[in-house]
Image (cartoon, helix red, strand yellow):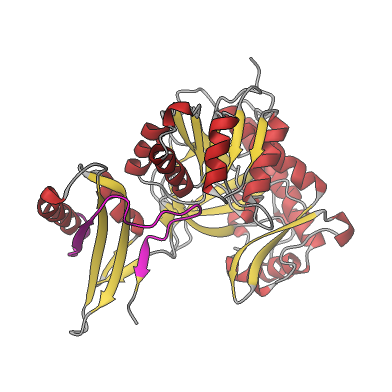
Amino acid sequence: MSKRFAPGFRTTEELAALQLKGLKWTVNHAYNGSAFYRRRLDEAGVRPDDIRSLNDLRRLPFVTADDLRDEYPWPLISVPFEDIVRIHASSGTTGKRKVMVYTAKDIDDWADMFARCYETAGLTREDRVQICVGYGVWTAGVGFQNGCERFGAMALPVGPGNIEIHLQFLVDFEPTVLCSTASMALLLAEEAERHGILDKLRIKKVIMGAERSSDIMRAKIRELFRAEHIFDIPGLTEVYGPGTGLDCEHHCGIHYWADYYILEILDPETLEPVREGEVGEMVYTTLKKEGSPLIRYRSRDLTRLIPGKCPCGSVLPRHDRISGRSDDMFIIRGVNIYPSHIDEILSQQQGIGSEYQIHLDRGEDGKDYMTIKVERARGSGPEQDMELSRRIGVDIRKSLLVRGIVEIVDHGSLPRTGSKSKRLFDNRD
């Protein structure tokens, strides 16, 4: 069966030609439509006519989240106000949110991108999709819903709210697909188990985004729902919203929609390209976005490109799951650590649950201390706590070269949430 939302290129050469055409259009559109971009490009000594190959991308200046906040309330706007049909915003400090404007074409393109996600996940028009993410000024809920309707499946737009309503819908309307954060998926699965209704559910696929999820967490969600597949969906408000890619049913990396944006993976310190397969910061340049185009936007998200071709045969390139953010790093006893490092170590352990917290404190001796609270596996008692704590502590010491106090706590004792779980608590002055 042909795919309605498949990309319009068949080879890497065709993709490169499409990207060059889009890059030229974007630079010209931004230069002529945005006072911010005109000033920034003039400062860099680059004019639209200077873009002759994809290598010229590296001549272009970067855009950061600080630029978006500094230019509030209309950062990057590149079209007349009468062409804007919607705004969305992501979180910000002191009221300065990162606001993006959308034209009708932007909304249309975004719906097509998201429909491609559902198509990549193997959905059919008979599927029923329960959407458990936030609506309003956030991009999540409306993105999932518009994409579902563009694809042609049934949307159940419940949002992130009342758990009892979610459980009722899961039973009464028999959705086959759940869209949520990983934390919300875990919460719903555990609540369904507690209410004794797991046998009544028909969830076959879970599409999760907005936060990193450990292998243990994913395995538990899949086990409880008896789901066939769990998919990762990336995206951020600055690049339309969620729906910028998806892993296929082979789960060998996330296919990203390279016909809508160029993705660079750069060293966050040097801003030079890392070697293929190495982890770096995701930097986006959009190719079709009218309202708020992006030119070399530093997302701070970390991942790596996956070389080679996916077993599914798609020509779309792939990146790995997002491992964290370059600004999430913390330093303890002179060692640089990302929360994802702890996550990876815990994912290799037996006898623990999926939830954990990292607490950083400064003692009266002036030294920093790290405590990692880890839940026991479901159904386990405290008999093995001492051995679990010792084993995990040894692995942390070996992998990170810093000691951590490992505290084993009761299963279900760490808070669950319908949004993103907070895992790092830095209590140092």
Quick check: 17 above or below 324? above
Q: Quadrant of residue 96?
A: bottom right
The stretch of residues the image draws in magenta is 399-425
Q: In the rendered image, which quarter contains the N terminus?
A: top right
Relative depth, front residue between 320 and 186: 186
Specify the principal SS of the magenta part.
Answer: loop
Quick check: 195 above or below 237? above
Q: Quadrant of residue 58?
A: bottom right
Residue that appears at 76% across and 62% down: 77
Q: Position of residue 350 (x, y in %)?
A: 20, 42
Q: Position of residue 29 (x, y in %)?
A: 78, 55
Left/right placement of residue 70 relative to residue 281 reads: right
Relative depth, front residue between 33 and 116: 116
Q: Position of residue 162 (x, y in %)?
A: 56, 50
Residue that appears at 43% across and 43% down: 191
Q: Which residue is the extreme one toward the top?
A: 1
Q: Is residue 418 magenta?
A: yes
Relative depth, front residue between 19 and 235: 235
